[in-house]
Amino acid sequence: MTKPNFHFSFFLLIALLGLFLSACNPAGNMSQATKIAPDPSLLRVGVSTNAPPLIYTKNNKVVGLEADLARKLAEYTGKKVHFVKLDWKNQIDALENNEIDIIMSGMSITDARQYRIAFSAPYLRSGQILLVRLQEKARFSTGIYSLMNSSYVIGTIKDTTGDLFITKTINGVEVKNFTKSADAVKALINKEIDAFVYDAPMVCHYAAINENNKLTPILTLATEEYMAWGIRKEDTELLNQANAFLADLKNKQQLQRMIRTWIPYM
């Protein structure tokens, strides 16, 4: 009988253990597959591709208003765009850790976020509005304030400004959190929730693509927010370039045309 090779067996065991741990590692942080070191020839753009029409994936390609703007900004700065897919909760951490250069993912300006990062000039006025079933539109005629002191079940996307607004402002409603906006819309269609609170551009998008399911936006803004791009505070060069790029788009009247292309009702 051949004597066992214990050195070989030991290294085989270590290799198998490594494979096992890799398989068990959760894939929640989407940045791992696309993480890339700083490169002066690249514009590393952090995106969470679950917010159509601003940023999402279609046929394995990153598309949407933010994607178009990112490609144009990269060209404007003489770089190539590189999209880094991240979970929403990891965007600011990745920016601070220099894993990305800019966040272009439908992020609104808030005091808390401004404490950590700089923002470009805003490119879009937005706010929180409702998506509801068309036959129930009259019940929500005053927008989010129709929810006051009601027994409705309201869908929100966890850790967004809409989720925060509902939690702090509206009493007596049941809040159901989702991680994906498409799942919240599906729940609305299936009557699992009574309304979906989200950013105006995304609500308008879902209303447009779900006409057959008879969904409609309530266009009364509950909050006024401005969407902009997040940049590290010390990266003043990119901040100045982003602001000059936006000013150029506005002067040429290209920005509003791009917005209308992607966002119905607005």
Image (spheres, rainbow, N blue to C red):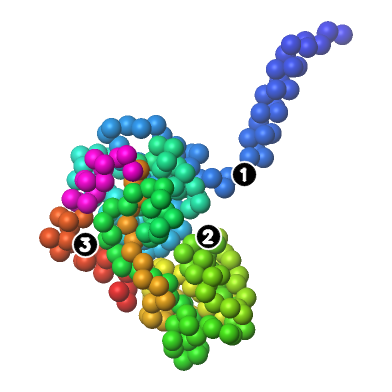
Q: Secondary structure at mark 3?
A: helix
Residue occupying the far right of the picture: 1
Looking at the rendered structure, the kind of residue marked 1 is Pro
Q: Which residues are magenta?
A: 233-245
Quarter-wise, where is residue 202 in the image? Answer: bottom left
Disc marking residue 255: 3
Q: Is residue 141 above or below residue 82?
A: below
Q: Is residue 187 visible from the viewing direction of this image? A: no
First in sequence, mark 1 or 2: give its number.
1
Cα gap from disc 3 to disc 2, whole angstroms: 28 Å
| Identity of the residue drawn at 70% across and 17% down | 11
Locate residue 116, reporting x and y percent.
41, 47
Locate residue 10, reporting x and y percent.
74, 17
Quarter-wise, where is residue 234 in the image? Answer: top left
Q: Secondary structure at mark 1?
A: loop
Locate residue 85, reporting x and y percent.
44, 47
The residue that label 1 is drawn on is: 26
On the picture, is 180 further left or further right than 24? left
Looking at the rendered structure, the kind of residue marked 3 is Leu
Cα gap from disc 1 to disc 3, whole angstroms: 39 Å
Q: What secondary structure characterizes most of the magenta part?
A: helix
The residue that label 2 is drawn on is: 159
